[in-house]
């Protein structure tokens, strides 16, 4: 196992390399650059081709592609993600505030998704093909089936607007409510009310996969020998299910969290735009619009690294759970 | 086995067919027991029929005349069962035409993904642990670890907009999941007896992959692909929301939906119906996919 | 609410179509005459909630190129001039100004005793530093071209600055009107490194509001400057204690926030105006105005067969723009009578325009040698008249506008394909390389009619070495007569003569039809009734340039 782990982590180096190639390559597809976005604000400035050239020159966008690539990677190895052309700031500063906001929202979403889908999956499996199973299946599938911006819009107009000011339509916190002034209870309540609607959309959309996965995992475990043995020994069904089966069925479910997190972060482009949540998805979307290459590349790379860590856990879990798979 | 391989090739195929026949019947029987899956299938058949026969069903042509006198007619207006849009066009007709793109996005994107995913996954799985496997899996993972929607948005916004580009890009970004499944299948199947046996008989690698291992991997591929078609449809809707969806005069449900957001308060039905159509379609695909999984999974025999 | 200037992509007023460009130059203003006379009179205090569509690109008045930047720095910094509601310049930092006898020296006398927010006095050195920074070869911002005709800036004494011009330049008031930085803060800073200076994100100016805080992705916070140099003459202004600008990217969410009382001012999409007027009567106050700018279809005048002026005129005659305004903008717009709107002092009321006349369109096509084919499409030498119209995606307005236009062209026998795409991709792949027939965009004019220069002067139509036209004259329109008039308009200082010159230029432009002017929005800003003293600035509505006069009644 330790050997596999080392190998797997070493394997992440070429993976990272491919991710950098990919992120960089996509940006090369765009024919123009950030200079037009910055200069097009002023009609007169756009009239002066020299100015456009001067900016490209200053930013090194006129250098050969491979030189730009190696410069970018080289700088990154020293912890420098380059500069945001649009914000004229180090990329790090642009991402610094956004990343924690996205992680915070999606962490709570992830916890809730697990908290809801595990019991749903278990009920569904234990009562396979029953009416309960059907209802759970239908509800779980319903979540993923609706476009998130559709649900979000309906929630803003249906819930927030009718909440008498209790639930805000946008933002992340009420200005002025801090630990110092109001105490942690008020802060908690305040942050929760801002998170309420985005969380509903994310959790609702994320339930499907896990609930179904939990169901089949549980079904599989229930057929295993040791469960049969436990039953044969005359243990109460509840004990069999909750003590023996559940523990084993939950393991593979926990292992998919990496992939789940990745898709949640991807979905944040829409959620964060609709709810004005100041996170990485919005930064990513603005960077695309502003042709802010360095920010776009950093967002892709950073979210990739996060997910990679998640997938590493998946792989380990798989080896652990299914001894039939051997890696060397 | 004392006398191996007395069967001729033809006999082997005949037996195979018979076995498939009974397997198929078994599959149908099990699938039919899953009520949600059957309902989903019926809905999909109806929706696809509507899409195929759109020219005969829709009351207005694809590029309907703008009719300012009939803007924002509510559902139930004469001649407009679902009302009209901001340019006085019949919403039901637009949705019928829109179903063509929305329903094909899923299939085309998944076709691309299944093709790539199966190819990469089987090669990697067959050569599991070797450098071929490692390189292929690193590429798959590289695409997979970047949140798909970031990738989609970035690529689609720099490309010339077209329905096909969107379908292909969605496909190109969603194959790694399938590749893992196929590879995983290979890894556990190739150690099973029949693979060992065939190899002992001197079967070539290609023959082994396509005649023996791949057929065993078909079930999980179908299941996963069906479940992902819904995801592809939603991706198209999400891109439409950002203004990156199918460009007019082409029309898709996602596009009607995102344009309708502007008229949310003025004409709420404009957002309700296409949203519902997407919802039902994706739901149906998921029910069907789930049903196929249950029906194919031999472990679930009762 | 127009947030001072307009950004390159997203419009400052969220209502408009996705693609905005800043026309003329920066306008930082204030002036007199509150629109609604308060009963109790203005009082100090309260917090105002405004919307920022996006995060600002930066907060430096000479580097920022977004409306979201100028919304903030516009309140923190002062510039030399303000513009009155009749668009005439008046002094902000400038106490008086004059063109010296040689006609090439523009002398500005500064007010004395103007203090920066850090307590230091503003002098002529600060003005010279700011202007020279813009003209510096290493300068990376977008403003250099505006100062092209200013050769040198000289501090005559502590409160007097001379602008040395290469030729008489009438639109100077708008072209030198940028927020004045404090020179002392930048001692030892290379101009090329200006953006790395802390002041880029923590502005220190002389304006009515002090910068307090900016939290990326969330909000910017400004605080009343009680020591504002115009406070006394403006009756104790500014009045509102704090201004909070919340970043809300989504128009629908912003609308919900306005209706929910989370925003005090917002410009809804045209589709919402009538509903808000009735549903929120007395609860949300409208400020209605005509936009100083327009959505327009540019026609590539160098591409066959569009080189023929008759084809371009036919394209214009074929469009029923009144109907398009109804269908695409809910009637919340007017068809522009000419390049300069009625709100401009250089407006020409007796302009002969091209109206809706499909028969005339067909007649022009026939005169140009086209005949109608069996499919109803005009053709010449076997080539059908097929054109492509590009526009940016993601806007229901543009979708409706292009759909209607396409069908109207179809009706007269012109086959137009509409391609909606990402705004940047459209510019990069099609407009700049000249690889297009027609394209829809929007343009915001400045207060001076010289705004037309950037669009219609032939010197800007020439492709660069890479074959790109990076200016806004993407029509590649080059008419020597128009060029001469636009140059003359810059040199002439007599307003009556300028009006005549620009009138003539407008008539030629309309006749040449390099653009089809589609609409000028009739915007309605809505604000909560607790906000008083809002000034309706012609062409800009509840502009923040007059925010110092606003006050909150609670």
Image (cartoon, helix red, strand yellow):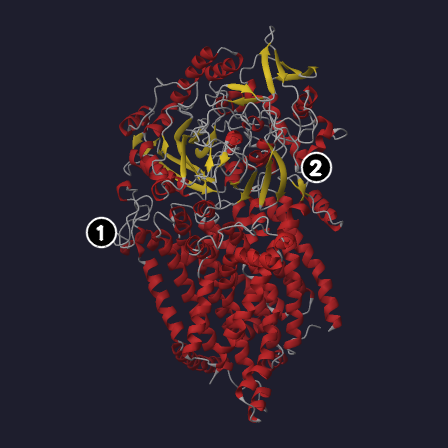
Q: Chain of mark 2?
A: C
> Residue B17, relative to residue B61: is it above or below?
below
Q: Which quadrant of the view contains residue B17?
A: bottom left
- Please tell me whether mark 2 sits on a helix, a strand or a loop: helix
Tags 1 and 2 both on a single chain = no
Furthest residue to the front? C40
Residue shown at 57% from the left, 12% from the top: C168
State the mark number for residue B180: none
Please give left or right for residue B86 compared with residue A32 in the image. Answer: left
Residue B235 is situated, as x and y percent measured from the top left of the image, at 48, 56
Decide: few, some or many residues near mark 1? Use Cα within 10 Å; few <14, some 14-19, many ≥20: few
Task: Tell which subunit mark 1 falls on.
Answer: B
Question: Please, is residue A107 above or below residue B243 in the view?
Answer: below
Q: Indicate the position of residue B132 as horizontal and vertical percent values.
A: 66, 64
As drawn, is C146 to the left or to the right of C392? right
Query: For the point 46% across and 39% down, which residue is it?
Result: C530
Q: Which residue is identified by label 1?
A: B78
List x then y, in percent, for residue A220.
Answer: 54, 80
Residue B146 can be seen in this image: no
Give the residue at mark 2: C198
Residue C361 versus residue C531 in the image, above or below? above
Q: Residue furthest left?
A: B78
> Can residue A192 be seen at all in this image of the molecule?
yes
């Amino acid at each position: 196992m330790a050997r596999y782990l080392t190998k797997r982590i070493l394997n992440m180096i070429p993976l990272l390399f491919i991710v950098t190639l990919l992120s960089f390559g996509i940006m090369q597809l765009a024919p123009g650059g950030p200079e037009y976005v910055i200069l097009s604000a002023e009609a007169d400035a756009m009239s002066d081709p020299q100015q456009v050239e001067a900016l490209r020159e200053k930013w090194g966008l006129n250098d050969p592609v491979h030189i730009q690539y190696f410069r970018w990677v080289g700088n990154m190895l020293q912890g420098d993600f380059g500069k945001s052309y649009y914000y004229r700031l180090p990329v790090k500063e642009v991402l610094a505030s956004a990343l924690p906001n996205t992680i915070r929202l999606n962490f709570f979403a992830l916890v809730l998704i697990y908290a809801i889908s595990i019991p749903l999956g278990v009920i569904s499996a234990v009562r396979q093909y029953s009416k309960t199973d059907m209802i759970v299946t239908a509800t779980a599938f319903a979540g993923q089936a609706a476009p998130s911006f559709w649900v979000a819009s309906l929630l803003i107009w249906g819930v927030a607007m009718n909440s008498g000011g209790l639930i805000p339509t946008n933002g992340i916190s009420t200005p002025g409510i801090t630990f110092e002034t109001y105490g942690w209870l008020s802060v908690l309540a305040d942050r929760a009310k801002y998170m309420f609607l985005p969380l509903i959309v994310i959790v609702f959309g994320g339930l499907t996969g896990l609930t179904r996965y939990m169901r089949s995992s549980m079904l599989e475990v229930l057929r295993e020998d040791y469960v049969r043995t436990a039953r044969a020994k005359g243990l109460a069904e509840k004990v069999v299910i909750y003590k023996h089966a559940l523990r084993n069925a939950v393991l593979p479910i926990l292992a998919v969290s990496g992939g789940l997190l990745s898709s949640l972060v991807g979905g944040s482009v829409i959620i964060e735009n609709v709810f004005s949540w100041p996170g990485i998805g919005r930064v990513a979307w603005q960077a695309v619009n502003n042709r802010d290459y360095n920010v776009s590349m950093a967002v892709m790379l950073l979210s990739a690294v996060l997910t990679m860590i998640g997938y590493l856990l998946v792989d380990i879990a798989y080896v652990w759970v299914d001894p039939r798979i051997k890696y060397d | 086995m004392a006398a191996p391989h007395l069967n001729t090739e033809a006999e082997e195929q005949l037996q195979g067919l018979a076995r498939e026949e009974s397997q198929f019947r078994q599959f149908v029987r099990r699938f039919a027991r899953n009520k949600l899956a059957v309902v989903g299938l019926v809905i999909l058949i109806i929706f696809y029929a509507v899409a195929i026969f759109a020219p005969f069903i829709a009351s207005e042509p694809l590029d309907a005349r703008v009719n300012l006198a009939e803007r924002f007619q509510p559902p139930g207006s004469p001649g407009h069962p679902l009302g009209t849009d901001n340019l006085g066009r019949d919403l039901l007709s637009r949705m019928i035409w829109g179903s063509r793109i929305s329903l094909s996005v899923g299939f085309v994107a998944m076709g691309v993904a299944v093709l790539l995913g199966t190819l990469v996954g089987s090669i990697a799985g067959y050569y599991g642990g070797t450098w071929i496997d490692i390189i292929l899996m690193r590429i798959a993972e590289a695409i997979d670890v970047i949140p798909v929607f970031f990738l989609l948005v970035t690529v689609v916004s720099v490309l010339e907009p077209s329905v096909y580009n969107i379908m292909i890009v969605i496909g190109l970004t969603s194959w790694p999941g399938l590749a893992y499944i196929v590879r995983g299948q290979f890894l556990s199947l190739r150690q099973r007896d029949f693979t060992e046996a065939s190899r002992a008989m001197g079967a070539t690698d290609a023959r082994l992959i396509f005649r023996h291992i791949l057929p065993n991997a078909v079930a999980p591929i179908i299941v996963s692909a069906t479940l992902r078609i819904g995801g592809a449809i939603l991706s198209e809707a999400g891109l439409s929301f950002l203004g990156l969806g199918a460009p007019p005069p082409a029309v898709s449900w996602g596009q009607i939906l995102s344009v309708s957001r502007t008229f949310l308060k003025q004409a709420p039905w404009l957002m309700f119906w296409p949203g519902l159509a997407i919802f039902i379609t994706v739901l149906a695909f998921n029910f069907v996919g789930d049903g196929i999984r249950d029906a194919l999974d031999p472990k679930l025999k009762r | 609410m127009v947030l001072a200037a307009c950004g390159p992509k997203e419009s400052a007023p969220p209502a408009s179509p996705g693609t905005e460009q800043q026309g003329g130059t920066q306008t930082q203003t204030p002036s007199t005459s509150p629109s609604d006379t308060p009963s109790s009179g203005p009082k100090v205090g309260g917090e105002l909630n405004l919307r920022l569509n996006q995060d600002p690109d930066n907060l430096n008045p000479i580097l920022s190129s977004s409306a979201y930047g100028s919304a903030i720095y516009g309140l923190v910094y002062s510039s030399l001039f303000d513009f009155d509601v009749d668009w005439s310049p008046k002094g902000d930092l400038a106490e008086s100004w004059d063109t010296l006898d040689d006609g090439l020296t523009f002398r500005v006398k500064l007010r004395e005793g103007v203090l920066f927010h850090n307590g230091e006095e503003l002098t002529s050195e600060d003005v010279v530093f700011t202007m020279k920074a813009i003209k510096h070869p290493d300068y990376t911002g977008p403003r250099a071209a505006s100062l092209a005709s200013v050769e040198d800036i000289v501090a005559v004494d502590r409160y007097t600055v001379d602008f040395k011009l290469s030729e008489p330049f009438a639109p100077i008031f708008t072209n030198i009107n940028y927020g004045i930085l404090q020179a002392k803060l930048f001692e030892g800073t290379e101009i090329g490194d200006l953006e790395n200076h802390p002041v880029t994100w923590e502005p220190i100016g002389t304006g009515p509001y002090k910068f307090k805080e900016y939290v990326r992705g969330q909000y910017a916070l400004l605080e009343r400057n009680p020591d504002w140099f115009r406070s006394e003459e403006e009756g104790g202004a500014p009045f509102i204690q704090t201004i909070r600008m919340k970043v809300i990217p989504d128009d629908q969410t912003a609308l919900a926030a306005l209706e929910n009382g989370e925003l005090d001012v917002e410009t809804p999409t045209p589709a919402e105006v009538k509903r808000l007027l009735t549903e929120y009567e007395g609860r949300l106050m409208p400020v209605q105005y005509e936009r100083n700018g327009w959505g327009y279809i540019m026609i590539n005048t160098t591409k066959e067969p569009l080189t023929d002026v008759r084809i371009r005129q036919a394209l214009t005659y074929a469009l029923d723009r009144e109907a398009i305004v109804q269908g695409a903008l809910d009637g919340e717009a007017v068809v522009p009578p000419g390049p300069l709107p009625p709100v401009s002092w250089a407006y020409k009321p007796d302009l002969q325009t091209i109206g809706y006349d499909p028969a005339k369109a067909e007649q022009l096509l026939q005169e140009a040698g086209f005949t109608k084919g069996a499919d109803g499409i005009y053709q010449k030498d076997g080539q059908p008249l097929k054109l492509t119209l590009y526009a940016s995606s993601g806007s229901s307005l543009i979708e409706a506008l292009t759909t209607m236009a396409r069908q109207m062209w179809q009706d007269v026998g012109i086959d137009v394909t509409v391609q909606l795409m990402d705004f940047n991709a459209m510019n990069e792949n099609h407009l700049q390389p000249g690889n297009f027939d027609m394209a829809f965009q929007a343009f915001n004019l400045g207060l001076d009619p010289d705004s037309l220069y950037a669009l219609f002067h032939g010197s800007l139509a020439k492709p660069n070495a890479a074959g790109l036209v990076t200016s806004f004259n993407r029509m590649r329109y080059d008419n020597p007569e128009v060029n001469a008039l636009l140059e003359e308009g810059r040199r002439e200082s007599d307003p009556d003569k300028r009006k005549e010159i620009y009138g003539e230029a407008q008539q030629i432009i309309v006749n040449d039809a390099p653009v089809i002017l589609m609409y000028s929005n009739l915007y309605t800003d809505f604000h909560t009734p607790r906000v008083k003293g809002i000034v309706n600035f012609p062409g800009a509505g509840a502009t923040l340039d007059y925010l110092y006069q606003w006050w909150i009644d609670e």
